[in-house]
C-alpha cells in the first residue's frame, strides 16, 4: 500500500508541475492565470494527490506508457494535455446542457466559462510541442496531435448527436451507446492510445490499448448513469440515460405512458422523481444497466488479457475495472 | 452491440415471479434457456453475485458503481 501511495504521489506531482509549466504562457496576465488555475478546482479538475481509494484517471497515459516500456516520463506532457482537454470538454458540456449547479457558467457566467473552456483547449493544443522536452521525435508528436484532434472531432460529433436528441422521443439503446463511445469514452481511449504510442508500441498493441480504453470509458459512463438515478439528479434533469431507455422500450404500456407523461411535462416534482426511480428498480432497468456495465468491463478485461499475453504487466491497469 | 436475448432475460425475470424464483435458486439454469453469448452469461452472473437483482436501492450497488464513475 505504501509503495502504491508513493508512485501515485510522485506521478501526480509531476503532472501538477507540467500543468503549471503549461500555464506559464499566461504569466503576462497574472489575474487571468490565477482564474484559469482556480477554475480547474471549481470543476474538480484541480490536481491534488488524489484519494488513494479513487482511481487515478489523470495518470492513465503514464500507467499505460510505464506498463509497456517500464518508463512513464515521456507521457507526462500527454497526460497534462488530456487532462486540460477533459476540463475543456466538461466546461463546454456544462454550458451546452445548462444542467450543472457546480459549473463554471453558474459561478462566472456563460461568457467567462466559454472563454475558459476555449483557453483550456488552446493550452492543451499548444502543449503538444512540450513532448519535445521529453525527446519525443517529430513523427510521434505529429501522430499524437492527429490522434487527439481526430478523437476531439468524434467527441464533438457525439455531442451534436446528443444535443439533437429529443427527450420526448427517446433514442434507441444502440444510438445511446454509440453516443457514449463518441463523446464519453473518447478521453479514456485517447489516454490509452497516446500512452501506448509514447511507449513505442506497435500498431497491434496500440489498437488493444485503444479498445481497452474505449470499453473502460463506456463502463464508467454507464456507472455514472446509475449513480445519476440513485441520486435522482439525472431524473430531475430529464436526462435520458440507459436505465430510462430500457424502461421506455421494455416495460408495459401503462408504465411507459406514465414515464413519458412525466418526461413530457418536464416535471421536477419529488413524487414524480421517486415514481421513476422506483419503476427503474422494479422493472429491472437498473439491473439491466448494471449488467451492461459488467459486459463492457468484461470486454475491457479481454483486451487486458490479450495485452498480458504480450508479456506486459497489467497490474496497475486492472484496478481501473474494479 | 445488440442484446435482445439479454433484454428478454431481464424482462422475464422482472415480470414473471416464477422465473424470478427459479433465477434466484438456480441462475445458471435459467440463463441456459436464453440465447445469451459467453460474455452476456458471465455479465449476468457477475452482476447477480455482486448486487443481487437490485429491485430497490442498496448499498452493494453504490459500492459497485461508485468507484467506476468517470474521471473523479
Image (cartoon, coloured by chain):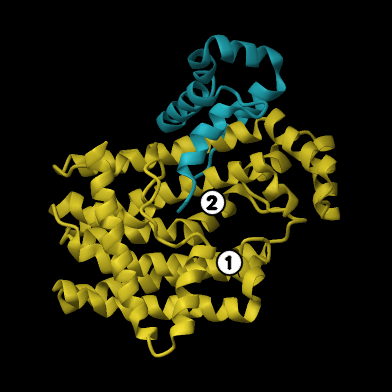
Chain colours: A yellow, B cyan
Residue A196 quadrant? bottom left
Position in image of residue A250 (x %, y %): 70, 37
SS state under label 2: helix
Residue at the spot x=58%, y=28% of the render?
A: B59
Measured in 3D between alpha carbons, the distance from the residue under mark 1 to the one under mark 2, in whole angstroms, is: 18 Å
Q: Quick check: A258 above or below A192?
A: above
Q: Who is closer to the viewer here, B25 or A126?
A: A126
The residue under the point 25% across, 73% down is A143
Residue A190 quadrant: bottom left
Chain holding disc 1: A
Of badges 1 and 2, nearer the viewer stands 1
Q: Mark 1–mark 2 contact, CB under 8 Å?
A: no
Is residue A314 at least partly visible in the picture? no
Q: Residue B1 in the image: x percent, y percent?
A: 49, 45
Residue for badge 2? A177
Q: Position of residue A244 (x, y in %)?
A: 68, 44
Q: Is residue A88 above or below residue A218?
A: below
Question: Is residue A52 rendered to the left or right of residue A221?
Answer: left
**Disc on the earlier residue, 1 or 2:** 1
User: Which percent across, then down, holds residue A86?
Assistant: 45, 65
Residues flagged by tags 1 and 2 on a common chain: yes
Q: Residue at x 43, y 84 (%)?
A: A30
Residue A124: which quarter of the image? bottom left
Q: Nearer the viewer, residue A233 or A264?
A: A233
Q: Is residue A260 left or right of residue A29?
A: right
**Local SS, label 1:** helix
Q: Which residue is mark 1?
A: A93
- Near mark 1 (Cα within 10 A), the count class, few <14, some 14-19 or many ≥20, is some
Q: Residue drawn 55% across and 47% down?
A: A224
Where is A138 relative to B23, above or below?
below
Name the one closer to the observer, B18 or A167.
A167
Horizontal placement of A248 versus A194: left or right? right
Amino acid at each position: 500500500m505504501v509503495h502504491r501511495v508513493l508512485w501515485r504521489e510522485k506521478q501526480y506531482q509531476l503532472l501538477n508541475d507540467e500543468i503549471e509549466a503549461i500555464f506559464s504562457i499566461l504569466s503576462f496576465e497574472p489575474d487571468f492565470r490565477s482564474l484559469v488555475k482556480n477554475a480547474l478546482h471549481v470543476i474538480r479538475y484541480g490536481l491534488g494527490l488524489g484519494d488513494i481509494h479513487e482511481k487515478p484517471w489523470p495518470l492513465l497515459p503514464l500507467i499505460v506508457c510505464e506498463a509497456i516500456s517500464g518508463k512513464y516520463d515521456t507521457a507526462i506532457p500527454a497526460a497534462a494535455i488530456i487532462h486540460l482537454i477533459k476540463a475543456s470538454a466538461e466546461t463546454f458540456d456544462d454550458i451546452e446542457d445548462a444542467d450543472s449547479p457546480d459549473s463554471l457558467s453558474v459561478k462566472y457566467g456563460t461568457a467567462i466559462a466559454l472563454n475558459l473552456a476555449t483557453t483550456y483547449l488552446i493550452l492543451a493544443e499548444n502543449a503538444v510541442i512540450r513532448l519535445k522536452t521529453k525527446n519525443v521525435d517529430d513523427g510521434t508528436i505529429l501522430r499524437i496531435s492527429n490522434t487527439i484532434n481526430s478523437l476531439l472531432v468524434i467527441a464533438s460529433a457525439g455531442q451534436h448527436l446528443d444535443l439533437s436528441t429529443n427527450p420526448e422521443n427517446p433514442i434507441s439503446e444502440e444510438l445511446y451507446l454509440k453516443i457514449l463511445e463518441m463523446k464519453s469514452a473518447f478521453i479514456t481511449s485517447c489516454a490509452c492510445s497516446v500512452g501506448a504510442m509514447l511507449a513505442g508500441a506497435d500498431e497491434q498493441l496500440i489498437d488493444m490499448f485503444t479498445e481497452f480504453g474505449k470499453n473502460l470509458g463506456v463502463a464508467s459512463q454507464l456507472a455514472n448513469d446509475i449513480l445519476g438515478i440513485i441520486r435522482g439528479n439525472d431524473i430531475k434533469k430529464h436526462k435520458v440515460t440507459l436505465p430510462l431507455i430500457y424502461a421506455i422500450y421494455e416495460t408495459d404500456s401503462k408504465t411507459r405512458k406514465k414515464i413519458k407523461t412525466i418526461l413530457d411535462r418536464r416535471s421536477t416534482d419529488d413524487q414524480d422523481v421517486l415514481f421513476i426511480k422506483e419503476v427503474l428498480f422494479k422493472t429491472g432497468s437498473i439491473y439491466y444497466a448494471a449488467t451492461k456495465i459488467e459486459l463492457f468491463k468484461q470486454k475491457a478485461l479481454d483486451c487486458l488479457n490479450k495485452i498480458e499475453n504480450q508479456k506486459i504487466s497489467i497490474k496497475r491497469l486492472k484496478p481501473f475495472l474494479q | 452491440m445488440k442484446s435482445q436475448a439479454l433484454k428478454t432475460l431481464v424482462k422475464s425475470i422482472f415480470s414473471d415471479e416464477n422465473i424470478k424464483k427459479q433465477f434466484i435458486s438456480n441462475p445458471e439454469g435459467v440463463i441456459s434457456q436464453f440465447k445469451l453469448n459467453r460474455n452476456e452469461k458471465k455479465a449476468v452472473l457477475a452482476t447477480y453475485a455482486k448486487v443481487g437483482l437490485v429491485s430497490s436501492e442498496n448499498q452493494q450497488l453504490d459500492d459497485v458503481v461508485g468507484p467506476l464513475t468517470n474521471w473523479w
